Image: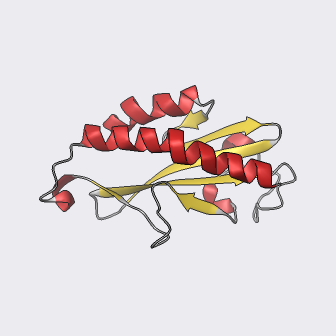
Amino acid sequence: MESLKATVVPVLRSLGFKGTFPHFYREQLGHIDLACFQFSMSGGKFVVELSYATPDRSNVYINSDMAASKLRISQTTNRWRLGDTGEHGDHWFIFGPARAGAAITVEQLSSKVAALLESEGVAWWSSKRNAG
């Protein structure tokens, strides 16, 4: 978590996101982009989930009148996991002992997540904003 906070959170801030780890949001012309880090209860892996709320909140199925700062991805109907190639609909970033045999450090993994936010994440949120 410390590596993600040191590497990824500054990228989110540079993109205009507010919030505190693990939940982040940004508002752009009434559209709210969301990002959340979720860790496996068994340890060694996490996902970065992305979502959004339309200005009319038609894709928020519970507490649609909630303030942007309190809105959570679990309340929305359309989500995407950062790094998902479309093959499985799911993508976990694996670290620690569960990553046995792979030569990747937590810092390298955090850098990868930061780069994916800037490339895949920005494009995904933009496509959702432009679709409405």
**Furthest residue toward bottom:** 88
| Residue drawn at point x = 20 percent, y = 58 percent | 99
Which image quadrant for residue 61? bottom right
Number of labels in the image equals 0
| Residue drawn at point x = 68 percent, y = 40 percent | 69
Looking at the image, residue 105 lies above or below residue 44 = above
Which of the colour schemes (rainbow, by chain, secondary structure, one colour) is used?
Answer: secondary structure
* The one of 108 and 76 positioned closer to us in this rendering: 108
Looking at the image, residue 39 lies above or below residue 18 = below
Looking at the image, residue 56 lies above or below residue 40 = above
Which image quadrant for residue 68? top right
* The one of 59 and 114 positioned closer to us in this rendering: 114
**Furthest residue toward right:** 56
Quarter of the rendering occupied by the C terminus: bottom right
Please state the horizontal and vertical placement of residue 14, each as a whole percent of the image. Answer: 56, 26
Quarter of the rendering occupied by the N terminus: top left
| Residue drawn at point x = 69 percent, y = 45 percent | 126
Please state the horizontal and vertical placement of residue 123, each as a whole percent of the image. Answer: 61, 46
| Residue drawn at point x = 35 percent, y = 37 percent | 111
Residue 8 in the figure: left or right of residue 43: right
Please state the horizontal and vertical placement of residue 79, each as a whole percent of the image. Answer: 61, 61
Which image quadrant for residue 44? bottom left
